[in-house]
Image (cartoon, helix red, strand yellow):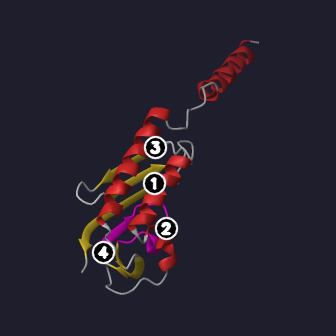
């Protein structure tokens, strides 16, 4: 009799260990309206700063810290002429990348602004962006679209920016 009571009590205790996890309130996944508004204003300000300078020829080193295949991470040097991507070259090999489509959304500065705008529109859980004070282009873009999903975050780095003649 006592053994069955002890076993039953032990079983209930083990079941109870999972109870706090199941009883947690849902996590708020949307950005607060204040933060969304601030991100939107920073984006608009820096996009205008970029556009005002009318830079059509430039190059930068791009890295994608995503949880994706190594070929899609870089670092790569992206060269833009007359506003269009001219080349995407691997920093490691110095050769053109074999799959430029991996960088399709990141291969010009205006497309990087679009990535930020998309994160705002989708109400990403977390969005942190640093911008160049001189030119306005983003230097670091960190996006976590959903706090409850692992490995869907983006960590984009733009460095070594050069205006070309």
Where, quadrant-wise, is the N terminus in this rendering?
Answer: top right
- Residue to which mark 1 is pinned: 116
Mark 1 vs mark 3: which is more N-terminal?
1
Task: State the SS at label 4.
Answer: strand
Q: Residue at x 30, y 54 (%)?
A: 131
64 over 10 or under it: above or below: below
- Which quadrant of the view contains residue 37? top left
Q: Residue 80 magenta-drawn?
A: no
Mark 3 vs mark 4: which is more N-terminal?
4
Place of residue 153 in the rendered image (x, y in percent of width and height, measured from the top left): 48, 53
Query: Which span is picked out in magenta?
Result: 59-75
Relative to 124, 11 lies left or right = right
Mark linked to residue 5: none
Place of residue 39 in the rendered image (x, y in percent of width and height, measured from the top left): 41, 44
Relative to 78, 14 lies left or right = right
| Number of the front mark, 4 or 2 | 4
Structural distance between the alpha carbons of marks 2 and 1: 11 Å
- Residue to which mark 4 is pinned: 58
- Residue to which mark 2 is pinned: 105
- Residue to which mark 3 is pinned: 126
Place of residue 5 in the rendered image (x, y in percent of width and height, measured from the top left): 72, 14
Task: State the SS at label 1.
Answer: helix
128 over 16 or under it: above or below: below
Q: Residue at x 39, y 55 (%)?
A: 141
Place of residue 156 in the rendered image (x, y in percent of width and height, measured from the top left): 39, 60
Mark 2 vs mark 1: which is more N-terminal?
2
């Amino acid at each position: 009799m006592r053994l069955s009571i002890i076993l039953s009590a032990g079983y209930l205790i083990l079941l109870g260990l999972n109870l706090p996890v199941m009883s947690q309130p849902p996590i708020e996944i949307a950005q607060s309206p204040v933060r969304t508004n601030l991100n939107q204003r920073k984006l608009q300000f820096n996009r205008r700063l970029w556009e005002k300078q009318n830079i059509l020829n430039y190059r930068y080193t791009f890295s994608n810290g995503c949880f994706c295949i190594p070929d899609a991470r870089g670092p790569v040097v992206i060269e833009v002429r007359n506003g269009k991507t001219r080349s995407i070259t691997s920093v490691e090999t110095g050769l053109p990348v074999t799959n430029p489509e991996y960088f399709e959304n990141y291969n010009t500065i205006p497309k990087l602004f679009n990535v930020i705008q998309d994160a705002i529109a989708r109400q990403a859980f977390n969005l942190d962006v640093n911008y160049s004070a001189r030119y306005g282009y983003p230097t670091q873009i960190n996006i976590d679209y959903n706090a409850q999903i692992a490995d869907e975050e983006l960590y984009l780095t733009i460095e070594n920016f050069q205006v070309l003649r």
